[in-house]
Image (cartoon, helix red, strand yellow):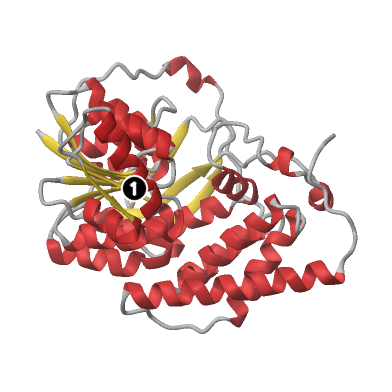
Amino acid sequence: MTRISILGSTGSIGRSTLSVAESYPERFQIVALAAGANLETAFEQARRWRPQMLSIASESDADILRARLKQAGISGIEVVHGTRGTVSVATHPQSDFVVSAIVGVAGLEATYEAVRAGKTVGIANKECLVAAGELITAEARRQGKPLLPIDSEHNAVHQCLRGGRMEEVERVWLTASGGPFLNTPRSEFKNITVEQALNHPTWKMGKRITIDSATLMNKGFEVIEACRLFHVAPSKVQVLVHPQSTIHSMVEFVDGSILAQFSVTDMRLPILYALTYPERIQSDMRFDVGNLRHLDFQQPDMNKFPCLRLAYEAAEAGGTKTVVLNAADEVAVAAFLEGAIRFNEIPGIIEEALAASNSGMLRSIAEVLEADGAARRYAQKRIREKSKKSAEPRATSVG
């Protein structure tokens, strides 16, 4: 029986993890949940799963949740809150496996503490590895515990790497759908609306990751994540645009052999793989091989999508630069979603923040969070300055 803690239980990965647990009740037990600010869903999850511990964002919501659980006659659930509560979920003594699925750096400290506590961690939060991957992977090596990727691309790489030794790897290929603007001329990027950017051709995701997919920054983050997870240089991680999104990733070996992984586009499959590794167990998720009839591939255009170039540069520099890349991107994407900047101005904000930041390695999570805060403040300042200079209306809707 694998006993699971979930960081981000009310999000899509968290809900998919609970779905997997529900399908295999003899294999998985839910021990602790960190539910964020979604009080209603947190209550429903508490009632359904009866975890030993449940963390929610605010102290006031924790009080409300305790009262509702008591009124419903549900006992035995310790309700905690805030960052400390999330860390308590991540390090719960009864938990064997921690699913890290909190979006952004909000889950960084809890993920790191889970690794320090000797838990096996399934990583679905790429920002943790982008901002603090060097610290997290070094601690995982000290603990002798695996970091198992849940993101479909890195999960695919992990599966392909079982076909050879790391010293036999020539390069890792990450596939990208290309997003909604693959065939849109760069000259039209300034007119792209929020609604258009949120219309991803393949996946239904949260707003930030959908915009990051449209700029190819999400793929840039995945390059950094691959470098940290698999201990390879950025030059050995290549991005290939593959609009069908059929092949999730590939690994090329020194003899010229290439292993590719493809499967249904259902996040329950990589979650199941991570939860049961190194086993594989029976599931009903089947891929129609007839879908392989048409596969297109092309190189990404880094002039048209400069966020990918910035990510490679940050990956080469490491340390503070990857922290700044993630923080400035989050601020810039939020500003675009709010109508404060245009779609084509997102890369410029990030590049300016990178240029203004210092290089250097970070020695603790506290230093990572300090660099993250400084980068956010700088990016927010530049956005305010741009907004003051331009009174021209922003394209935020199609109607």
Please give the name of the residue rendered at 31% of the width and 76% of the height, measured from the top-left corner.
Answer: 364
Quick check: 194 left or right of 23?
Answer: right
Indicate whether 346 appears above or below 44.
Answer: below
Q: Which quadrant would the C terminus be assigned to in this image? A: top right
Please give the name of the residue rendered at 32% of the width and 63% of the height, measured from the top-left corner.
Answer: 109
Q: Quadrant of residue 259?
A: top left
Q: Nearer the viewer, residue 151 or 174?
A: 151
Q: Please state the horizontal and vertical placement of residue 345, each as a whole percent of the image.
A: 74, 61
Q: Please state the horizontal and vertical placement of residue 245, each as a whole percent of the image.
A: 52, 33
Indicate whether 106 appears above or below 134.
Answer: above
Q: Please state the horizontal and vertical placement of residue 135, each as a whole percent of the image.
A: 30, 69
Residue 8 visible in image: no
Amino acid at dot 1:
Ala
Q: Mark 1 = which residue?
A: 62
Q: Which quadrant would the N terminus be assigned to in this image? A: top left
Indicate whether 84 appears above or below 272.
Answer: below
Quick check: 321 left or right of 71?
Answer: right
Residue 280 visible in image: yes
Callout 1 crowding tier (Cα within 10 Å): few <14, some 14–19, many ≥20: many
Quick check: 94 left or right of 124?
Answer: left
Please give the name of the residue rendered at 44% of the width and 48% of the height, measured from the top-left corner.
Answer: 173
Element assignment for label 1: helix
